Amino acid sequence: MKTSNVNPLSLNYQGIQEWAKNYVEEETELGHILKDPAPALLTNIYAQMVKEGSVTANEWVKRACQRHLNDLKREKDPNFPWKFDEEKAWRPIRFIEKKCKPSKGDFNRLVLQPWQHFIVGSMFGWVDKKTGYRRFREALIFLGRKNGKTTLESGLADYMAGFDGENGPNCYVLANSQKQAGILFEEARTMITSSPWLRERFVPNRSEIRFPATNGKIQALSAEKNNKDGENLHFGVFDEIHEYQDYSLISVMKRSRGTRKQPLIVYITTAGNVLDGPLVDFIDQGQDCLKNYADDIKERTFYYMASLDSMKEADDPRMWVKANPNFGLMSIVDLISDYKSDRRSPKEYADWVTKQFNIFAETDELSFITPETLEKNNKVINLSELEGADCIGGYDLSNTEDFTSACLEFPLDDGGVFILEKSWIPQKRFERDKNPERIKDWERRGEIEIIPGDYVDFSYVLDWFEKMSERFNIIQINYDPAKALRLNKELENSGFQTNEVRQGFITLGGPMQNFKELLLDGKVTFNNQKIFRWYLNNVRLRQDRNNNWLPTKQSQSRKIDGFAAALDAHVSVIDMLVEPTENDGPASEFISFK
């Protein structure tokens, strides 16, 4: 049978075995699976195969390949600073295949596949026309689990420590925990001890691998280890940055490469459940870079982002190679059989989506929103279109030393809503935040204001509402009475109508369910504000015995203040979301809270 015409999920076990055998044979014949090392560099060939469609790839791998091919065409342009040096691209690939030995499995040599030729060849082959130094200072390799990630990390670390032409290269395998970093280090050490050629040249100690000829070293570091400043990094490989909640370790390593001529930091990871960490930022930056090629955004960062294009492809193993470029070398029969069983369990299915299909997903069944739902709500409205429009205000003061948020919610003609949100944070709180770079980015976008001092003076919130009232018709401002007595009185003195919203299941349950219905329908517009997206990602549901809902935080560090302000406003906006009857008579149909 021709495998492209048959979905193996519809087959019995024997049929799956036959399908898998035919799939491997077909892919091998096409040159997509290699049994022996390639006699030549395949970087350009792989990019061309992806472009032509013979290799099944997702949108972002296609765009990465097109970026490479476009850059090859631009080499002749004197104003284009980069060129592709095939010898430099080929060198680390030859090293890994000829000198490194696998530490696991039932095979005795490493064979890099065409997709790995594309990744390694791109990272090392693109150089400055004048100096010959590497173009790419960073690389994001984003793919499903069990795709040879650790082997590639170890081989690159060994190459960079001794054979990259650098004097005294400091190379680091990095992870969120010291235990995980130790696992990576041990893999690099075992790869050396498994190869007689490498064993003669390296000194693989328990805590440090040394290469005396260049005074190079490989060490394991993690976010748990203190005093990382001054590491003078030449090469760093970060493992599973989906676990990182802040930039602390990443920032230290990036700052430590200042004296190096061509340092390289590689992030190799699968997707995860931390939806507000560095990885999500990296993915956004990569998509921006690849989607807007002509703008030369992040031109010194290489991206290879493999995942399914949509959740619909999860039930089609023919598409799994999009997230798993090594799919043809995996235990295909077991994978398909396990998936057929596991997909019946929400928890197991969520793990498949995140780790095998490489799509960000929240495994908690009580999470308020999924990334897929959030992407439906990506419309943009020009604020000038809402001049003079009716809206409801809401605010959440939280603690004076933490995030404070306010918003306006506008009912729209299509039955949806528009959210205009603003946040504030005191300087002292900003300074102790685990992810200050993210807050500075929000500040540049005008989404948050960093207030001098130790606390947020609530007059900033009052001033914002007064300023907004000059443009929009604020019917009333809803508030949580717990911490709002003073501000509420000042709002009333300024002429605003205010309304108390009790924070209980009965008051907020219906509005919260309705807000989620609007999100599921793609009818919540917030002009892609990054901070409001963060607030939404942080919301977790609490349920009472009657299945009523209340919002709570995923964790102590993941704030929901902006969503809480919007939900307070939504309590009243619901009454404004009324669909008129066909004869334009009195409004008669209201939103259901079923």
Image (cartoon, rainbow, N blue to C red):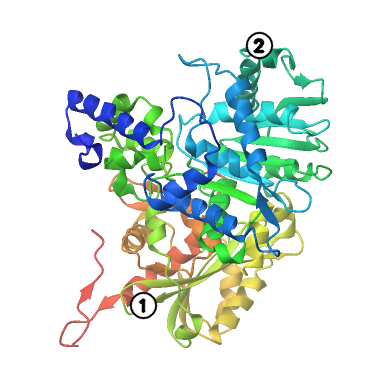
Nearest to the eye among marks 1 and 2: give it.
Answer: 2
Front in this rendered view, residue 428 or 231: 231
Q: Upstream in the sequence, badge 1 or badge 2?
A: 2
Q: Position of residue 350 (x, y in %)?
A: 36, 39
Displayed quadrant of residue 353: top left
Q: Which mark is residue 123?
A: none
Which amino acid is tagged 2? Pro
The answer to whether residue 263 shows anywhere in this view is yes
Query: How many residues crowd around disc 1 within 10 Å: few (fewer than 14), some, or many (20 or more)?
Result: some
Q: Is residue 267 above or below residue 161?
A: below
Question: Is 320 or 196 nearer to us in this picture?
Answer: 196
Q: For the residue labelled by badge 2, is the local secondary structure a helix, a strand or a loop?
A: helix
Instruction: Identify which residue is drawn at 37% across, 61% down.
Output: 376
The residue shown at (68%, 61%) is 80
Q: Confirm whether residue 175 shows in the render.
A: no
The residue under label 1 is which amino acid type?
Answer: Leu
Which residue is at a point 42% across and 37% down the rendered structure image? 324
Q: Residue at x 48, y 80 (%)?
A: 382
Label pair 1/2, CB-CB below 8 angstroms: no
Tell me if 541 is positioned left or right of 203 in this view.
Answer: left
Q: Which residue is mark 1?
A: 412
- For this view, does 56 lie left or right of residue 538? left
Residue at mark 2: 196
